[in-house]
Image: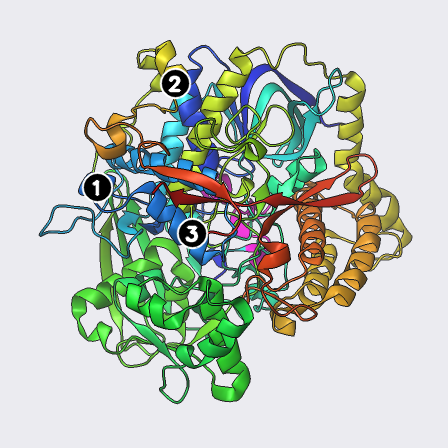
Amino acid sequence: MPTFVYMTRCDGCGQCVDICPSDIMHIDKTLRRAYNIEPNMCWECYSCVKACPHHAIDVRGYADFAPLGSSVRVHRDEEKGTIAWRIKFRNGQKDMELLAPITTKPWGTCIPKLANEAAPADTMRNSELLFNEPKYVAMNDSALPTLKSNKLSLKEGVYY
Amino acid sequence: MSYKTIIEDDIDVLVVGAGLGGTGAAFEARYWGKNKKIVIAEKANIDRSGAVAQGLYAINCYMGTRFGENNPEDHVRYARMDLMGMVREDLAFDMARHVDSAVHQFEEWGLPIMKDAKTGTYLREGRWQIMIHGESYKPIVAEAAKNSADKVFNRICVTHLLMDDSKDNRIAGAVGFNVRTGNYHVFKSKTVICGAGGASNIFKPRSVGEGAGRVWYAPWSSGSAYGLMIEAGAKMTQMENRIVLARFKDGYGPVGAYFLHLKTYTQNCLGEEYESKWFPALTEMVGKEYLDTENQHLSHKPIPTCLRNHAFINEVNAGRGPIHMITMEAFQDPHLEEIGWHNFLGMTVGQAVLWAATDVNPKYENPELTTSEPYVMGSHATGCGAWCSGPEDVSPDEYFWGYNRMTTVEGLFGAGDAVGGTPHAFSSGSFTEGRLAAKAACKYIDDGKAAGIMVSDKQIADRKAEIYKPMETYTVGRNEIVAGSVNPNYINPRQGLDRLQKMMDEYCGGFGVNYMTNEKLLQIGLKKMATLGEDLEKVAAEDIHELLRAWELKHRFLTSESVFQHTLFRKETRWPGYYYRGDAMKLDDKDWHVLTVSHRDRKTGAYTMEKAPLYHLVDDE
């Protein structure tokens, strides 16, 4: 559900405003803290919850179908490359902690800059190949499939 | 207006909307255009934008050729069957032959892909799906796009595409406004790759009030890919092919991993299997070519998504709802139970929140399912989008006009939801389409096709006035009333959206009418759409945030109008379970084994509809 912001934890840093895909986390001009200005456009995607450095943002189930009293909290850590969740049921009978990796590499270090790659030859430009192909298609030396290589043709009409 | 005009000139490749399609385009464009100027304009922040903002727990389109699993043509046949034959098989084949190379790069970049401990291959969820820990899928691919782009403009709501004033039907860039500063942004570009996404919130959602944001596709998916391209005069295809999803009730949590990996299954309220009993009558409706229960079961071919919906809808209407997902068996295994929860946390946290709030423990209780309101998009089990050229070495003449993924507007390319007739692309396929479009866009420029583009000051000034008009309407009209939102001379964006959703639901086959429509209803609906269109000239925006909602609404409106026109044109029920034409309840291969193509005249707004031939991949034997 829609997000809300705890008054005593928010320092108005604006990380949530910066990341919200729906443009609904805004800074209140009087209180200088963030709040959800349009709960019915919230996808409860948790982007702002994860981005908040003070864990000041939480989620309360949509009023039209979710009862009060449960909790789903999260801590995302790019340095450790993990995301940790805690789910607490309304009736207190289930309390789960779940951990998942978010990356297998030191954050942001293994993504290429294509400007540094050798420029493609004309033969490649005139082919159907994309960057790193054909090698990356099947991680071997085989060529990119074509209709001809796969003994196919396109025929008009109903053929089943 | 006091807003500044900021012009970004001499762009070669402008990416409008950087979800999975747009990030793929920006990334790849740098390889083919070493010295080209590549710019991204994104409505949100590309680290968390588009349909994958929240993450994904699976990549649903991966061939696995390297493991000897599938060939591209296998995927085309699967998509064709799932969509009742209606697929651009040239585009689908092209996407499928390239898609693995994208996935293999994602893995190198750090995306955690699960492995099968025994075989060392990627862990399969189903034949086409592989399982990932994809919470950071979007930030990772965004990094790749940022590494390639010269500039990334976040928080720019692109409202219109710019057209060349020297040559008819040629693209020249885009315009929009910054949703923070309010400034007017002009992007003059030789090519545009539109990846602005499909549409949620077009049909009235089942959720009400505060929960209206709990839609299956992201609420920020405003159909802008369609709104922008339709306005620019690009031809569209298969816009009638909206999708309805069978999902966990209220939270719309995904069911793919549950069905395929956890091996859960569905039952009616009496604990009975219900699907198969609807199939004989359904076979009568669609023909044996599309539903041959016996042989399909024997050959393990999946039943098309829409037909499974049909059984669900009919069983509920027969009074034997709700339909339950039987989780109590699988969830006794603690490992599978954990996967079940991780699956939600990785892509639909709201479903976990809902189960926690309602004390639904799937280990001891079988959760309810529902069928959603319809959605208009082109990368899941549906293929709405622009009519695009295919690749030279695959496409027949009717499907080829020079540049892969180029629309019928010169220099305007599509990626992801923007491209029509390419269902089952999902995240990886959308990224791949972006890459294909980027290569083609660079070639288009290198071939000199973008020479001599001219954008008049008048076009730029006219668009500026048009963009801010809702704010002016508000300023002028608000003093007429004491306070509140009821005004005789304007409506606000939320009021307009409510009206659009009600209309789409009642006249175009939403959940409120059991997905049923007919010619009469569609004609009444179109009449009402015309007056909504007039009223949208008077939509009012109190501030810049509301201006964003106003333009999203206009894009949703253009998308909806196209859906109406296409639904009216196709006089058959091609996808029972997605929607029904009550006046033509059978699938009609004699007249309608074709793709539908529409064109909206830029000046008059008048629609023309045509049929385009369907080509199928066949074995050369």
Q: How is the image coloured?
A: rainbow
Q: CA distance from mark 1 to mark 3?
A: 39 Å
Instruction: Estimate how packed mark 2 is, as few (under 14), some (14 to 19) or many (20 or more) residues with alpha carbons within 10 Å.
Output: many
Badges 1 and 3, same chain: no
Q: Which residue is mark 2?
A: B31
Given this view, does label 2 or label 3 mark the residue nearer the observer? Answer: 3
Pointer 1 chain: A
Residue under the point 35% across and 19% down: A114
- The type of residue carrying mark 3 is Ala
Pointer 3 chain: B
Q: Which residue is mark 3?
A: B79
Q: In this view of the protein, which residue sits in the foreground, A23 or B593?
A: B593
Rendered view: B459 above or below A106: above
Rendered view: A141 above or below B49: above
- The quadrant of the picture occupied by the C terminus of chain B is top left
Q: Which residue is mark 1?
A: A80
Furthest toward the front, the residue is: B621
